[in-house]
Image: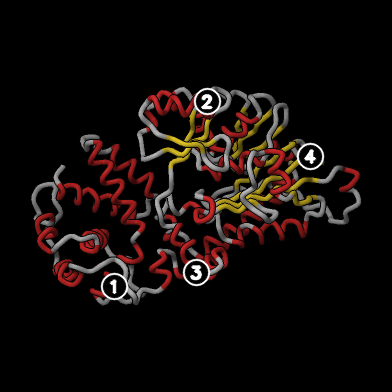
Amino acid sequence: MNQAARIQALIELADDIAAGGAADAATSAYFRARRYIGSKDRAWIAEQIYALLRRRARLDWWIGRVLERPETAPPPPARHRVIADLLTQGWTERDVARAFDGDQHHPAPLSRAERLLVDKLAGQTLDHAEQPASVRGEYPAWLEPALMRFAGGDLAALAKLNEPAPLDLRVNTLTTSREEAQKRLAAAGIAAKPTPWSPLGLRVEGRPALGREAAFQAGEIEIQDEGSQLVALLVDARPGQAVLDYCAGAGGKTLALAAAMRNKGRLVASDISAARLERAVTRLRRAGIHNVERRPLGPEHAAWFKRQAGRFDRVLVDAPCSGTGTWRRNPDMKWKLSERDLAELEALQGDILDQAAKLVKPGGRLIYATCSLLPAENEVRIESFRATHADFDLKPVPELWSDLLPGPCPVDGPYLRLDPAHHETDGFFAAVLQRQPKEEAAKTETPPAEEQEPASPSQ
């Protein structure tokens, strides 16, 4: 593909994402439908679309300024964003005119508004002194108070949320060791180094196509952010236990829990989406895991979950959340979240915690986790839960760390709170709550919660 054809592909993909598709899924679908696009062109288009998403707020600010668009106007067309991006990244008026010539597989000629953009933006830089903090920081203005509470006013910490994330792997200890996996990757020309916190992690240099590697196909490695690995390790799942992954999704943490259990014991993966659970089958087989039972959530399965009350040693609730901690990987997500969405998520998280708590046996543990940075979804959620569940005690993470993981604990407080600025992981939160033994629980005065159907972990 020549450069103009690449630009046209970028515009088409940006249109697909603007229409509502998630960036990763839209990108995969776009390339599947156009298998004629070569690997180098795919790599360029994929890199540019994510860069475009990371610069969206500043590009929209420039487009609004030049075209005098009111603040209430709908988002600008993808073509406008691509043109503005090219110009603020150093393209000249002549460069744009050459690419937008209307030839076959090239972008259509510039409209009148687009010619104005080219005229006004040529030679401009992306940043401008008059841009508000939310525009410079590339986040929704309505989330600014909550994000500032997370960052303590540190704009550099917020800026980290807009940088590309590293590629982390978790080594499957059922089949190999971290050292052996590192050697096997090196032999394939892939450089990787141990992650600083997780004893199972490797951080890969660059963006190699891991799906074709022998180590991946043999189930020796799985792509998983180091922070996600630490959450799974804090569950402290052991061989022979009964463990429930209550919001399992496609099974990333389920795989880690099964490896920790050495395929011994009972591991149940549950999710509102039976299709997501079914997609996990291929990953489980590849990893050599055979102790996982899949159970969909929903009203039709409520009776089964009711019969499981008090039967699990560990219940992991990887709750549906705003995903603010994963913005580095999913920069499009921040613009799809609304205040109403957040309020609904907070209510759902409370319902899920209430239902999951019933499944924990006396002396067992409930682990609540999100990939959110917002206190309302994290500390506030746990404080609210504890106010109505006096039979659950908070287990401080630093006390657990020394028994479960090597090296110093990355946090001081009672919760696991990770973020890109301080730990180079995605943003994660986790709280470990232990249910009191029966004799202790009998002393509490909290009335029993009413029987309800299990809450669905996603909408």
Give x and y (percent) for residue 414: 70, 54
- Of residue 298 and residue 414, the one placed in the foreground of this image is 414
Q: Which residue is pictured at 84% across the width and 56% down the height?
A: 446
Image quarter for residue 258?
Answer: top right
For disc 2, the neighbor class at 10 Å (few under 14, some 14 to 19, many from 20) is many
Read off the residue under disc 4. 361
Read off the residue under disc 2. 287
Image height of 229 relative to 214, above or below? below
Image height of 66 relative to 164, above or below? below
Label 1, label 2: how many angstroms apart (C-alpha)? 50 Å
Label 3, label 1: how many angstroms apart (C-alpha)? 21 Å
Give x and y (percent) for residue 340: 52, 64
Read off the residue under disc 3. 144
| Left or right side of 265 for 85 | left
| Left or right side of 420 for 443 | right
- Of residue 67 and residue 72, the one placed in the foreground of this image is 67
- Residue type (three-letter) at the residue carrying disc 2: Ala
Disc 3 or 1, which lies upstream in sequence? 1
Q: Which residue is pictured at 38% across the width and 32% down the height?
A: 190
Q: Which residue is pictured at 36% across the width and 65% down the height?
A: 57
Label 4, label 1: how many angstroms apart (C-alpha)? 57 Å
The dot on residue 64 is 1
